[in-house]
Image (cartoon, rainbow, N blue to C red):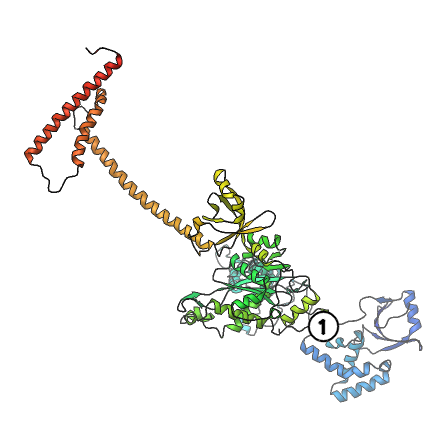
Amino acid sequence: MALLVNGVYKQIDDEEMFRVLCLLPKEDSVVVVSLKRKGSVPLWKNLSEMEENVDEGTLIHIEGCDTVISLKASIVRENRMEKAWQIIQHFVLDEPSCYIPKNRSQFISKASEEHKVQRIIVQRYLYRYWASGKTKYALRGDYQDNGKSRKKGSEELGKLGKPRKYQGMGEGRNVTEKDKRDIESIINSYYNKNTKYNLMFCYRAFLEKFYNQSDTEGKTQPITPPTIHQFRYHARSFIDLKQRIGEKKFERNNRGILDSSKSEIMGPGNAYQIDATIADVYLVSQENPKRIIGRPVLYFVTDTFSRMIVGYAVTLEGPSWAGAMSALYNTINEKTKLCEYYGVQIEEADWPCSGVPSKILADNGEMRSKASDRLITGLGITIANASSWRPDYKGIVENSFHLFHGTTKPIMPGAVYPDMRERGGRDYSLDAKLNMFDFNKILIHYILGSNSRLMQRHPQLDPDIMRDKVPAIPLKLWNWGIKNRSGLLRQVNIEHVKIQLMQEETARVTGKGIKFRNLYYTCPYAIKNDWFSEARSKKSWKCKISFDPRSSEEICLRFDNGTYEYCKRARSSEEQFLGWSHEEIALWYEYNQVDRKVLEKQAAKKLSEHQKDIMAVIEAAKKRAMEYDDQSIKPGEKKNIRFNRANELIQEREKEAFKSPQSTVPEGAKSASTDKKASSIVDYSSILENLQRKKREEQKGDDPL
């Protein structure tokens, strides 16, 4: 069997090991160097004899030792390697001349004199180079096995490590295996469970628990504990950072970055990232520049492949589906009309981002609502929601916010800076000058500039992009991707997009119209099919509608076949909540219910007070009845109800009759009048009684004569 250059062989009889440096078949020679005797020189041996020994098995090849390369080295060792290589480079590359003893001796003398080093140093460089597989990296030196070896946990070797600087502190002691277990217990109990515990607190707990135990006499055991430095050194191996700070925070700030957002992204429109933030600027009212309206909510939609900002929205509402709906609509729609509304004239090529993407990456917010389900079913968009508290999943759109604020804050009046919350800090809201229209205009100009900027790092370095030399400019990457990797953006009817972005609910068809949130709507389809007459005469029913929560003027009636029809306010509710949004109407009803509850409480209190007065009158009547000797009403008294009623009626008429303020009745005449009325009442009562008796007799058939 032929020998291998750089192969390591071992003799069975004396266990001698050597490395083959050079084969000379014509001369039947081989050059080897011993690995057992450090610093030995190359030896010339018979090639055929060694090959026979290999065939006989007295000389065996050692696998895995053909080349020794150490890639880990400090700067000092790297410099040492370069210096040694400069000394021996030209000599060792001249094979087989470098293996001749005479040439080697002459080279060592010459190199020692030229480089001002000892001969033994040059000899070591040569041996290290040859013995380690003829590689330059062997000149770094092999120090991994240096130092005193000891068995773990051994206490017989004395104190390890550097001696103490101040000998009066004692020699110290080694950390035992028991100490390590105790340290691990403390770290798991405190440090890994809560960030409020630091290592110094853990060390004190360690001393208190394991080195402050009293004996039977109540005295503290004089045991020397490990120092704080020893505790810190061994505690590092037991610290679990993921458990200490939480998995989400660890994944966000400390995980290994093995991938990026551009993975598996084929081209423009393959994946968009959407997010919202509160803009760092205060705005004023468009009607009155002296009124501060606060900080707006800003939405950005960014293409993952090209880093283009493909859509945006600004709203005064908090992060909600309404804001996300506006951002997505502006993303899918053409940008020329949007820019024209704010007085910015552009060509379609300046911002050519329109169409439906394949995927949208969002956070666990607006895109997790039921309204986003129609993006999947109606527009065929895949919605991916990143885990909460993981902004690194949407790093591209997050960086868009960072770049916008970094570019515009220094020049925008009313911009917010961190020192606002500090004591004595400036109130930047008083510097506000921009309104919503101005801010939208600034955003458009910024986006146009951002899409044409040269990025510091190229986001895509695929072979075809490098071949075509596409610069790291978002607009250039977008145009190249549309041309070479097109098919990911789909064009749809913009009205269809509106319907899919609206929120979906159910309304009820009634005799007054289609009732939705206490308002009534009508449409030609419902009138043509006589919906309202049918609902009034028979029974109402539910129907599917879509609506924009920002306006209550219209809703959209949806049919099962996918068609739709807009419905306007019916006359019965035309004047109600004119110009209000659905959210404002819902808020009004909510406040109205609160006011109603307050009024109900007040009315109940008043009713309770009147109830007490009624009971007082009743009690007075009962008390008055008790003043008579015979308190009970006799059964025969019932037949006198008509006569008693007539007497009471005359008295009530006298009380309620209209009289002039000047009319007065003399005291004597008043009493005479009263007596006359009394007599007339008696006569009237007797007449009525006689008539009643005659009527009863006639009914019996008796002859009154």
Most foreground residue, 591 or 107: 591
The percent coordinates of residue 541 (x first, y second) are 52, 42
Q: Amino acid at mark 1?
A: Asp
Q: Is residue 684 visible?
A: yes
Is residue 56 toward the left or the right of residue 448 in the image?
right
The percent coordinates of residue 621 (x first, y second) are 21, 32
Most foreground residue, 484 or 648: 648
Rate crowding at label 1 as few (under 14), some (14 to 19) or many (20 or more) other CA atoms within 10 Å: few
Is residue 420 toward the left or the right of residue 700 in the image?
right
The percent coordinates of residue 657 (x first, y second) are 17, 36
Quadrant of the snapshot with the N terminus? bottom right
Is residue 152 toward the left or the right of residue 625 in the image?
right
Q: Is residue 187 visible?
A: no
The residue carrying mark 1 is 468
Quadrant of the snapshot with the C terminus? top left
Most foreground residue, 244 or 448: 448
Residue shown at 83% from the left, 85% from the top = 105
Give the farthest residue toward the front: 528
